[in-house]
Structures are given as C-alpha cells and as structure tokens.
Amino acid sequence: MAAATVDDILSDLPLGFASLILRPSRAVSPIERFLIVDADDETSDGGAAFVLLIGVRGRSALPALRRLLKNPPLVLAVKGGPGELGEAEELLRAAGTGLLLVDPAADWDRLLSIAKDRIQPRSYQSEVLTLLEEDLFAIAQTTARLTSSHVVIEDAANKVLAYSTVSNDIDELRKASILARRGPRKYELLLKDLGAYRELHRTRLPVRVPARPQDGLRERVAISMFAGDRIMGYIWLQETGDGFSADVDYVLTGSAARASAELIRYRNQQSVHMREDRIVRILSGPEEAAASAHSEKIPADRPTALILIGMSAAEAQADDAALKHGELANLASIHAAAYKPSAIVGQFNGDTAVIVPALQSANAEAGLRSLAEAIVRDAERLLGISPFGAVGPIAPDLLSIHSVTSKTEALLGCMRRSGNSSVATVDDFEVEILFHDAVENFTASAFRHRSLWALLRDDSELAETLRAYFDASLDVAECAQRMKLHKNTVYYRISKVSRVTGLNFSNPRHSLVALLHIQEWAGKHKEHLGKK
C-alpha cells in the first residue's frame, strides 16, 4: 500500500470538484484503503479508510452517516452544497473524521480513479486486472451497441466488473450498482425473489426478467458465464427505450463465452507462479537458467529435477479445461513449495511444469515420485481430473536441466498413450520411449518399403492381421486367438504378406522394418477413423 494522505488525494482533484470542509483529526495518517458505501448498506468497517457515501446527498445522508460512525472512517466523501451538512459536520468533528464535500454534478468514477491510483500502487496483479477490465469493458461496450441496451458484467458474487457507457436511460438499479461496483442489497433480494438467479443457475440460455415500474426496474435479459459447471459470473442487459434487438439472445450467448474466457485467463494469471516465462527461460538453456537463478536466488549448482503434469487428451478438450489447467498448476505449486520452498511451477507447452532445484543428491527419485503422486491424487480428489505425472531424469545442476526436457516430454507422451500409469519415471517406460522415438524418426524420413507400404495402404485385412501378429510377438496361435480366427487363416495371411513383400519375419532386420511401417500405418489409420 502507498502511504497516501487526504492531502495527496485533494492535490489530484480538479479545481471545483470537491472541497475539504472538515480536516480529519489524523490528517497525516495514511489512508490504507477506500470503501464505497451505499445509503442502504449496514455499518461498514471504516477504520483507516477513505469512504465514498453514494446514493444520497446533503441532509438525506445523515442516517447512513450515523451508521458509519459506529466505526468512524478517516475521511468521508459525500455530495452536497454549502450549508447542507451542518449537523453532519458536528457529528464527524466529534468522531475525528474528515468531510469531503463533493460537487453534486461531479462524477464519482473520477474520484474513484484518483483515490485508487493514490492508495493502491501498481503491481503485477493490478496490471493483469487492468488488462482484464479493459477487455471486459470492450466486451460490454460492443454488446451494448449490438443489442441496443445497457450492459453490466458481474462476477459470481455480484461485484460489477465492467459496464457499457452510461446514458440517461439507465434505471436506479444500474446507477447504484455502477457507482458501488455491486448491486444494492435490496435489488439483489428482489431479483432473487423474482427467480432470476435460480433460472440463471439452471440454464446456459439467456433469461428474461420483465420490467417492474413500481420498483424502478426496466426489462432485463441476463445470462450466466460458465466454465464447465462452475458459474464465473453474469452479464445483465437493461433495455434503454427502444427495446432489445431481435438477435439479443444470439449476441448475449457469444458475449458470455468471450467474457468467461477472459475471466478464466485472469484467474490463471493471478499467481506469479503461473507465469510461463519463468519456466520457459530456465528450460531454454544454461545462460537463461543462470540468469534466472541469480535474479530469483535459486541454488544452481546442485541436482535438479523436472516433473511434468499433464491432463489426458479427453480432459484437455472439456469445456472447463482452461480453468482446470490453472487450478492444477496452483495445486502443484502448493505441493511443490511444501516439498522444496525454492521449487518453481509454471506452464510449459500446455502442461504444468515443476522444477525442483537444490536436491540433496542425485538419488532423490523416490521423493520426487511421491511429490508427483500427491499432486495427481489431490487433482483427482479435488478437481475431478486424472492427470499424468512424468518424473524426468535428475540433472546434475539447474544449468543443465534443459537437457532432460525432451526425455520428460517423451515420457509424458508415452504415459498418455498407454493410459496405464498415473505417475512414472523414465525407467518405467524406457523401451517405449526409445521405440516411439525410432518411429518418429522413421516417419520423418521420406523413404518407404514400397511393396509393404502399398499392401498396408490397400489391403486392410492383411494390414490388421500383420499388426495383430506383431502385437502378439509373432506368435500365430496368440494372434489367431486375439482376432478370433483359425490358426491356418493367420498362417495363410502372414505367408501372403511375406510372399508379396519379400520380407522374412524371422529375420530381425526385416521384422524391424515391418514393425516401423506398421506403427506408422496404425497411427494414420487411427487418425483417419477419428475424422469419420
């Protein structure tokens, strides 16, 4: 927090915007925070706060002011003219609270902005929040133009995150909620009584709320912003006189999807540990790793490990995958910090990376496996996902951790394809990693055994039999049992393949060539079936 005083804020205000009628008894005391209080709010914890009392002005502010003085704020700002707050001055003077009289025509948002800039210093998180607000305000403004309405975007706790340009066509609910950055309590209860929130929680479609002139409410249409089954917030549209446009439901559905994506992105960036650049820098090479170690005071000369935590392909395609992705990294960061305070957690090529430096020795595999198991276990229990934890080889020091990245990624890939092990080390999948690497290198080559490749491409029956034959370790009886065929049928088909291609499968080199071709064909065949 910045050590801002009431004089600091006054010095930033435009001439004639407001005047300090009464100086606080603690004029040099720093203002630690600011509060926006609606006239209908119950007593707020004023403390060392700068309080904006909205929704009332002049003498009508007295009831709310008396409630505030149960815990007097440092400074109170209220709208009114000279001579309207004589009684309020006496009450505030006795409490030692300052009184800032704001011109009735002044814009509360301007005062809010100045107070925030003075009281709350810029930080990484506030910069991320500023970017979020810019994106959400742009979404609100665009939605308003497309639907001929006034738009407010709220989070799940009904805090106002963004809104479209204010016009004279907004009702009292919108005015109050924009100023206080949340809906007044009495209106929230009214909307709940009307069943609006119950319907918003039940459906992903837009919900209509009819006008209630007796309560000062115009017609509304709203939609919930979802991440999977979790509600991230709401978008409210208020008609502005011409009624809603014909495509309001279509536009609102698109706006909700866009705003929900921004909220998920913001949640995933709130933690500095989630920043991808820290991990990428360390894994990019020794120079960058050395620079990171120096700037972040990370021990660089002791054994270091890399663990990759990745979701399954199916889970990565789920509606709430982005949110779960961030939650998984947050969970991993807590476990990693408990295991080693200097551990670094972030995003790497779509997975969660955990770098554990300063290990006591190169024989720390058991402890690292336990760490990965704890992350996976809690992810299943708390997040409802079943990720894979790949424990890479231990590097001799932080500067050489980049050398184990490809092996750890290859291990995670094998685990995803196998689906049998939730946590593993390279030793568990060493043969599969080497074989997959060989297949990938072969696939990258342009040269093929022409007759075998043509047979695999053109004769699916022989191709499937040959694959089953190799899967059964060249055992005809086992192959026949798996395919539910007679052994003689399998003998005939394998002999035909050998005759057509000239390959002898009892020859290890011929078998290796055939196996590489079969693996490539199987991958392409699976991909083709997936597109159907």
Image (cartoon, grey):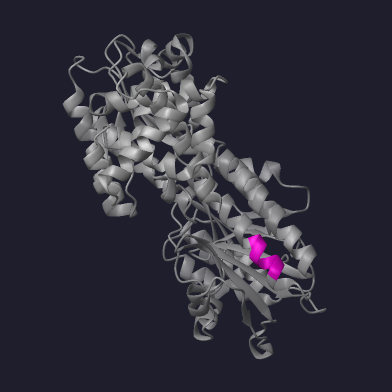
The residue lying at 54 percent from left, 86 percent from top is: 194
The correct choice, above or below, for 377 with respect to 343 in the image is below
The correct choice, above or below, for 471 with respect to 385 in the image is above
Residue 287 visible to the viewer:
yes
Outermost residue toward the bottom in this view: 214
Task: Tell me the quadrant of the picture where the C terminus can be found.
Answer: bottom right
The residue lying at 38 percent from left, 28 percent from top is: 515
| Relative horizontal placement of residue 498, taking residue 481 as reference (left or right) | right
| Relative horizontal placement of residue 221, taking residue 296 as reference (left or right) | right
Residue 396 inside the magenta-drawn segment:
no
The correct choice, above or below, for 241 with respect to 254 in the image is below
Q: Residue 338 location in percent, x, y?
A: 24, 34
Give the image quarter of residue 413: top left
Residue in the foreground of this view, choosing between 315 and 152: 315
Residue in the foreground of this view, choosing between 427 and 305: 427
Residue in the foreground of this view, choosing between 438 and 323: 438
Q: Residue 204 location in percent, x, y?
A: 55, 70
Q: Of helix, strand and loop, which mostly describes the magenta segment?
A: helix
| Relative horizontal placement of residue 317, taking residue 52 as reference (left or right) | left
Q: Residue 57 location in percent, x, y?
A: 66, 70
Residue in the foreground of this view, choosing between 435 and 204: 435
Residue 407 visible to the viewer:
no
Q: Which residues are magenta?
A: 250-255
The residue lying at 76 percent from left, 61 percent from top is: 165
Give the image quarter of residue 121: top right
Q: Residue 422 location in percent, x, y?
A: 27, 41
| Relative horizontal placement of residue 291, taking residue 360 as reference (left or right) | right
